[in-house]
Every structure is written in C-alpha cells, then in structure tokens.
Image: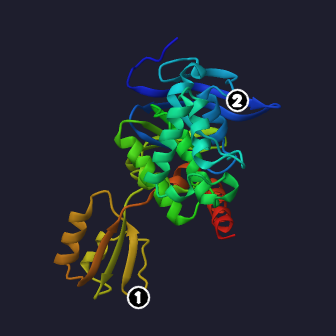
Amino acid sequence: MTSTSPDIAIEARQIVKRFDGDTAVDGIDLTIKKGSIFGILGPNGAGKTTTLRMLLGIIDPDEGERYLLGSADPISKAHKVGYLPEERGLYQSMKAFDAIAFMGALRGLPLAEGRKRGREMMENHGLGDAVDKQIRALSKGMAQTVQLLGTIVHEPDLIILDEPFSGLDALNQGKLERLIRGQADRGVTVIFSTHVIAHAERLCEEIAIIADGKVPFKGKVSTARDRLRPQVHLETRELDGPWRSSIPADCEPLGHNWHFTLPESGVEPLLEALIQGKAGIESLSIERPGLHDAFVHIAGEAAAKKMDADAAADALGEAA
C-alpha cells in the first residue's frame, strides 16, 4: 500500500492509539509535504511523542492508517529516516565520533564512512576539539549535538526530532535552529515536536497543534495567526470628537492611549476618521497576533498554561 501523492512525506488518516483503555491519540489526520519544516506543537502529555512513534512505525495505531515516504510499512523506510527521540541516550564510554558512526551504522551507513563523516561533521560544527573525547567528558549541549549529528550522518530524506530543544541553552538552541534550516535547504523534510512556541514560529511554515490527543488546527502558521484580528495601539491628543465613532464603543482610554481590535473595515477608514475628526494622532501601530495568541485561541487557556509551565521547567533545567 502506498500514499496517494509522491510529494507527501508523511500522511496520517484518523490514527488512534489507546493505552490501558485511555485514548492518547484520538483520530489525528496529518499531511506533511516533502521538503518542509513542520512543527507539532503542544504541551507535554498532549500526544506528540505517541503520534511520532506511530508515524515512524515504532508502535502501530489501533485504528487508522499512516504512510511514511509513501509506504504503509514505515520500518521499511528506516534507512531513509533520521530520528532523535525525546529520551536521549549515548554510550558514555564511546568516543564522540564513534558514537556518530555507530548511529549511522544502525541506518545502514558503513562504519568506516560514518567515522569519516563523524569527524568532519564535528569539526564543521565547532566540536573539533571533542572528536576523540568520550561522551561522558562532554557537556550536555555537546552530547546532544553529537546525538543530533548521529541522527543525520547517513543523510536521510526525512528527519524527525522529538523535543529537540529541550534542555539546551539559548546558544545551543540557536545552533540547532541553524542546523534544521540547513537540512531543509538541501531538500530534507524536517518534522519536530515542541512545547516552545517561539521555535515553531521562527522555523515552520506549517504546524499541527495537538491538545488532549486531538488536532484542533493544522496548516500554515500565518493561517493560525489570522484567526485573530490585529490589535490597534493608538495615542491621541484629544479625548473626544466625531472620530470616536471609529473606535469600538466598549473601548475606554488609559490616559490618551487606546487599545482595541482592528475593525473589519481595516485601517484605512479608521485612519481617515482620526485625521478628519482632528483626533491629533501622536502614535498609531497595528500589531498582528503572534502564534502564542493563536495557540491560546485554538487550544484553550488550559493547554497554553500547561505549555508555558513546560517551557518554564525547561528554562530552570537549563539554568541548573
């Protein structure tokens, strides 16, 4: 059995997974185009990892179908996939470049070639001094970079990263973002899960939002943000006049500052009314809602608070 389109890297149709009678993933549909950076966004426990494991064939769905690189048997495409699980793990006594080579060998890359590439990749990513060090001698960020390099050493067509930014400081998060963009630039499909909205907003054109095992939204980041109207920040010299009719009736100023949702008619009629009514515009800005605002609107306050708490816990872990 194959997927319907050669341009699709991942396709899931109403996949369901239950554990001990509890539904972890409840009828998810996904279509992910080849060559894209796709983010799966949601709090811990929302079903992100279970979904990724079903897509990879690590576990089977109880209901529904999934296709990976055109095949209904994801394991048969394992040599074309790089996977970084949420649970990190490297042999502590192994040298860094050997760890990369070993991970490549698991995907069919000859060990000698993996060792050669491992050395080159570490040097290219600023880890040349650590090539011959044992994993136990590396910092947390360096060890995670080594594991990531091992994930891509065999030059896969599809890379799946489960919470790749978790536990990394800001510097290493930036390095990882650049690496993801670099892989996408060479035509690789990159899928990553995250509970940190900023990463998805910076990297992804398309996302899926997961909450309580369901996907209330999938599509372009811009489409998610467009579900909310832009916000107007206005400062006027005057507080009253005919221009007041252009501002929502329930909007009360704070001093001479106004904050309200942009009317459906757009900014031009508003600006015209302010000028003709001699409001005395001191400043006017239109702020488009961010992805965090869209997430709250789509997934709800509870899911957003849970995700913010997860991100805060990550930050504490980095500081420690």
Q: Residue at x 63, y 61 (%)?
A: 139
Q: Residue at x 59, y 46 (%)?
A: 147
Percent of width and height locating residue 222: 38, 49
The residue labelled by disc 2 is 17
Q: Residues within 10 Å of mark 2 (few under 14, many from 20)?
A: many
Number of the label disc, if any, that sits on residue 255: 1
Q: How is the image coloured?
A: rainbow
Q: Quadrant of the C terminus?
A: bottom right
Q: Residue at x 57, y 49 (%)?
A: 146
Of residues 127 and 295, which is closer to you in this image? 127
Image mark count: 2
Is residue 286 in view from this perspective? yes
Q: Amino acid at mark 1?
A: Gly
Left/right placement of residue 5 relative to residue 277 reads right
> Under tag 2, what secondary structure?
strand
Percent of width and height locating residue 24: 71, 36
Residue extending furthest toward the right: 20
Q: Nearer the viewer, mark 2 or mark 1?
A: 2
Question: From what the image shows, is residue 61 above or below residue 236?
Answer: above
Quarter-of-image position of residue 57: top right
Residue extending furthest toward the top: 1
Query: Which is nearer the N-term, disc 2 or disc 1?
Result: 2
Question: From what the image shows, is residue 189 above or below residue 249?
Answer: above
Q: Amino acid at mark 2?
A: Lys
Of residues 91 and 51, which is closer to you in this image? 91
Q: Marks 2/1: CA distance?
A: 54 Å
Of residues 290 and 230, which is closer to you in this image? 290
